[in-house]
Amino acid sequence: MEHKRSHFHDYSHAVEYDRRAERSEIRAQLVPKLVEALELAGRERVLDLATGTGRFARPVAERLKHGKIIGLDEALAMLRVAQEQDGKDPIPGFLSTAGTAEAFPFRAGAFDRVFTVFALHHFSHPPLTMTEAHRVLKPRGRFVILDPVVATAEDALDEAIHDLINQILRRMHGNDFHYHSAEDIQDLLTGAGFHITRADLHAFSVDQDGMDGIPTGRHWLEIAEQMEGESPELRMRFEERYFRYEKKGEKVHVQGSFGYALVCGEKE
Ligand SMILES: C[S@@+](CC[C@H](N)C(=O)[O-])C[C@H]1O[C@@H](n2cnc3c(N)ncnc32)[C@H](O)[C@@H]1O
């Protein structure tokens, strides 16, 4: 399978990503949930893994009166937008560095918290990322993961839909792309030696024109379009679990629900 270079490396895409992220109501509602899950006292050293343009780093940084936050990302274009902060004050106590989720450029036990938002589904070797997060955390340190998820599989039809979703995504976005379920995320964390301290599922209902404001919404629309070619049984289940859409000329109306898992693992 061809390895596609991610569009996060393209500066104009990074600027556009940041602009859309700013307008997203769902993201705004997830910010306090992430901050709460991090349980910060204000002195911690925090790693924002795959920080992108620093959209989640800022509200976390504002809770760190005497701490530090490091943003790691492989895309220099995204980090450049994070540094520029277009007209806004710099993110307090924030340093960014280029690097990958598979080999962090930090010593063991360097952090009190690691978090990663809207990024796990991009990582090429999630078990390696879990091991790296475990390595760089201090004992009792926490790794908090927030990511869009597929629904828990209740039968073979759900499993077939998961497989199909990920097949479609890999065809379009390269071999690394993969939506996990909340259970998969817990298994990844426990597999690396973390103890699960919370696992929440946040579902957001939508009834709107277009995918604006829905994180990774474009990918979900591409999946729904490709589902059109599948059996009626499969399509119906997809619509029950996720969403239906209707095209009216250039416009598309979507109605359904999108789920985000917030899972927290503690290093023993
Ligand atoms: C959808 S963005 C999310 C950015 C940010 N966390 C947010 O929520 O706004 C995904 C980010 O993951 C980064 N990324 C993807 N795979 C990565 C990897 N293997 N190592 C480091 N960063 C990666 C991309 O460059 C991109 O900035």
Image (tube, grey):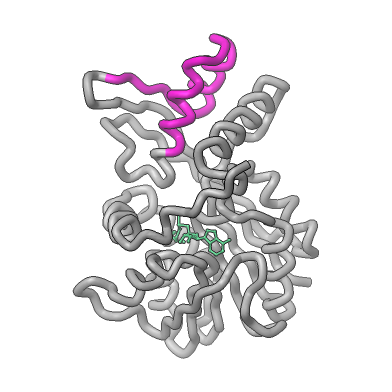
**What residue is at 68 percent from the left and 60 percent from the top?**
197
Which quadrant of the figure contains the C terminus?
bottom right
Which residue does the image show at 50% across and 37% down from the upper left?
Answer: 172
Magenta stretch prevailing secondary structure: helix
Q: The magenta stretch spans which residues?
A: 219-247
In the picture shown, does residue 190 fall above or below 44?
Answer: above
Q: Position of residue 200 (x, y in %)?
A: 58, 49
**In the drawing, does residue 141 fall left or right of residue 116?**
right
Query: Seen in the image, is 182 located left or right of residue 51?
Result: right
**Quarter-wise, where is residue 154 in the image?**
top right
Instruction: State the image coordinates of residue 54 (x, y, percent, origin top left).
Output: 40, 69
> Does 121 sit above or below residue 60?
above
Give the quarter of the image for residue 13: bottom left
Closest to the observer, 194 or 52? 52
Would you say residue 45 sits in the magenta stretch?
A: no
- Residue name at image x 59 percent, y 68 percent: 100
At which x and y percent is residue 7? 42, 53
Please state which of residues 6 and 1 is positioned toward the viewer in this rendering. Answer: 1
Q: How many marks?
A: 0
- Against 70, residue 247 (above or below) is above
